[in-house]
Image: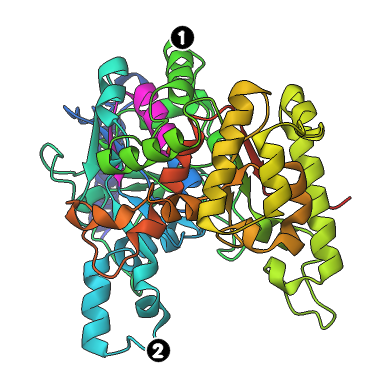
Amino acid sequence: MARLIRLTYYLVALLFFLILSIVALSRYQLVNTVPTPSTKVTKTPIQFDTKYLSWLPHGEFTDQHEAFRNAVQLGKELNRTVIAPMLRLGKPLAWQPFEQMAQTYSTLQNKQLIRQKCTELAVVTNDQTCITLNDWTEIPWSSLFDLDAISTEFGIPIIERTHGHGWGLDETSENVMGSITDTVVIDVLTFMENSTFYSQHQQRQWDGLFGRQSSQRILNQPTQDKNKLPLKTVIRPQQWKDVDQRQYIQFGALSSTPRYQLHSTPQQQALRKALSRHLFVSPNQMAPLKYQADQVIATLGGVNHFSSLRLNLAKVIALDARVNKDATGAPITTMDDLDVQTQKELMDAVVLEVFGDIPINQAVSAAMPVNPDSTLARILLQQQPSSSPQERRQLLDACIDYRQNIEERYPIYYLVNDHIPSPASQPDTYGPLLSFFPCLFTKSDMKHWGKLDMSTWISSSPVLQDIGVDYEKMLDPMLDILISGQGINITIMNVSLFA
């Protein structure tokens, strides 16, 4: 019996030591399989032959133009090919958070899809998207601006997305080399952490028309409510290294220049100066449009013989809380909704603002009485003023003669007005302006004189084939830029003027 007990103790002890040996061996193997900091293997990033960047367009022409300028500077900073979406003319798109703006760009800015939807659902008469379909259009930037000049002078490759509205992994530009397999989204106005990575291996999941893609963010999830105003975050120059190896950067809104900061290098300074002086400045690549602008310029006396005045009266009214609502609280949007006294006060304010903005020599010349022995004095006395095309042309000839032979600083204005085609047709409203600046002419005058007729060539342009669109109205801003750029100075009235 004693021997059996000793044998039992021996077997238990042997089993205990066997278990300890197994545990010790397992720990030893585990320690040797975990890499230490000195032996940690880092993943080598994929090297892409060509890297790209693009953005989502929104806003009026000035916003889209600024976004393109910023994209070019980012292309230089990051050594990337710039993929330019087309220029939207007409009804602008307001800023939205990235997901909504991407949805709008991919679906609500694709006219082929919209027309198909409107036809299938037969909602042309009651769907706002279908009703406003012809209020806007898209054309390639290269149809107006010389993009090759940017690439030639600064070595920044620029390609255009002229078909489709796919971006990132679904890029539809025909000039992209190879396939896009890696995309990073950056939109400081939407994401608190500035960017969102899209992995090539993740299954994309959508909610609704656009929804939210599976993603991994650099820092924290955004806390912004989509309905709030844009964030005020900024990307610092040193942060660009975080996305240097990514194949494709998709920006959201790029028109907010201070949000995307760059290194202040000599190359960037030279590029910025060129973009403000001679590159991407004048929309002069559409030959028929430039010819029409040259016709108007010659009629006004030639280059540097006139000035430009732009009256954004609707914006003036909208920004001033003292006049933008009537007695019932209903919004006032046009001059016609104002009472006679307020209209007079507005035009008096415009006159003072113009005098404060133009060069002092022109201001003195305009304020002085017209030489009573001149043809201009006789015409002004007879017309008082006149909206007759024939008499308006006599007035222009007298203005040019006065400037050439009597007072070389006397102002002749090319007027862009968002209220009526010709202020001379409403002398009661525009009297204060016309009394100080009688030599003031518009596109309406040019059309009556046969100097401006865009309908003769628009239908033959290969990039202006969007059926139902009023291209003459769409291209008006480009025409104004071409004309104004050849004048002496430009005066823009689009802020509150009331004291």
Residue at the spot x=81%, y=31% of the render? 368
Q: How is the image coloured?
A: rainbow
Q: Work out how far the residue at label 2 is from the one at label 1, CA to CA, in angstroms.
A: 55 Å
Which residues, given as a range, are shown in magenta? 67-85
Quarter-wise, where is residue 309 in the image? Answer: top right
In the picture, residue 289 is in which quadrant? top left
Q: Amino acid at mark 1?
A: Pro
Residue at 21% over, 78% down? 116
Residue 494 drawn at (x, y percent):
67, 49
Q: Secondary structure at mark 2?
A: loop
Side of 44 relative to 423 (left or right)? left
Q: Give the prevailing secondary structure in the magenta stretch.
A: helix
Mark 1 closeness class: few <14, some 14–19, many ≥20 residues within 10 Å: few
Frontmost residue, 475 versus 383: 383
Q: Give residue 266's mark.
A: 1
Farthest residue, direction top: 266
167 within the magenta span: no
* Residue 5, position as x, y percentages in the image: 28, 57
Q: Nearer the viewer, residue 61 or 262?
A: 61
Residue 84 is covered by the magenta coloring: yes
Mark 2 or mark 1, which is nearer to you?
2
Side of 306 relative to 127 (left or right): right
Is residue 212 in view? Answer: no
Q: Amino acid at mark 2?
A: Asn
Q: Is residue 488 above or below residue 348?
A: above
Q: Which residue is mark 2?
A: 126
Sequence order check, earlier mark of 2 and 1: 2
For the point 59% across and 66% down, which residue is it? 227
In the picture, measured across the screen, residue 235 lies left or right of residue 29, that is: right
